[in-house]
Amino acid sequence: MQPERRVLGPAEVRWNDYVGTAAADDADAVLDRPSLYELAGVDRGRYTILGVDLTIWEDTTTASVYAVDRVAEQLETHGDIDALGQERGEIPVVEFPLPAQAVTEFLDDAFKRIALRLVARGVREHQLVVVPQAG
């Protein structure tokens, strides 16, 4: 029996009333501070992290990172990873869920900046333009 495969698509919640985009900058490397790989318990010598999930669901916040196994896929460079995606149309990744108690530290230490923009689902195809508030 083949293991279950799951495609990582756009973020989804129950009703998707608001949809959008997110972006983040890696935290600056600082002596005596854990790296993204250390925070997620990922062996940097074997894996390259390619994705991050953060889910806030009622009273629970979870996070996972997704990394390609460079050893199993015989990849040496980021260019090799891109070529694998071009060749296969997909890149296999392994999920590394973070323990619940580590999520806050992960967010505080892994990223220097995070931006999240959500817009109402019904207008997602339209450009929203900020104008002065009427008087």
Image: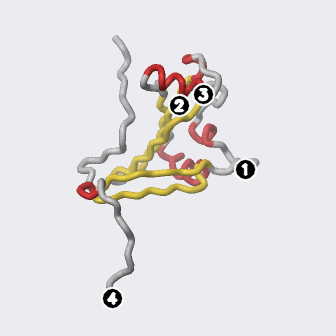
Residue drawn 51% across the image and 22% down it: 84
> Dot 2: within a 10 Å radius of its alpha carbon, few (fewer than 14), some, or many (20 or more) residues?
many
Q: Amino acid at mark 4?
A: Gly
How far apart are the two marked residues, 3 and 1, measured between alpha carbons?
27 Å
How far apart are the two marked residues, 1 and 4, measured between alpha carbons?
48 Å
Q: Position of residue 54 (x, y in %)?
A: 44, 46
Q: Which residue is at the front of the view, 39 or 17? A: 17
| Colour mode of the rendering | secondary structure
Numbered tag placed on residue 135 in the rendering: 4
**Which residue is identified by label 3?**
79
The image quadrant that residue 8 belongs to is top left
Look at the numbered disc 1 and give the secondary structure of its residue. loop
**Which is more N-terminal, label 4 or label 1?**
1
Numbered tag placed on residue 30 in the rendering: 1
**Which is more N-terminal, label 4 or label 2?**
2
| Of the two numbered discs 2 and 4 in the rendering, the one whose residue sits closer to the viewer | 4
| Of the two numbered discs 1 and 4 in the rendering, the one whose residue sits closer to the viewer | 4
Q: Position of residue 120 (x, y in %)?
A: 28, 59
**Which is more N-terminal, label 2 or label 3?**
2
Q: Amino acid at mark 1?
A: Val
Q: Badges 1 and 4: C-beta atoms under 8 Å apart?
A: no
Apparent side of residue 2 relative to residue 41 in the rendered image (left or right): left
Residue drawn 34% across the image and 60% down it: 127
> Dot 4: within a 10 Å radius of its alpha carbon, few (fewer than 14), some, or many (20 or more) residues?
few
How far apart are the two marked residues, 2 and 1, measured between alpha carbons?
22 Å
How far apart are the two marked residues, 3 and 4, measured between alpha carbons?
54 Å
Q: Amino acid at mark 3?
A: Gly
**Which is more N-terminal, label 1 or label 3?**
1
**Which residue is identified by label 2?**
67
Residue drawn 36% across the image and 28% down it: 6
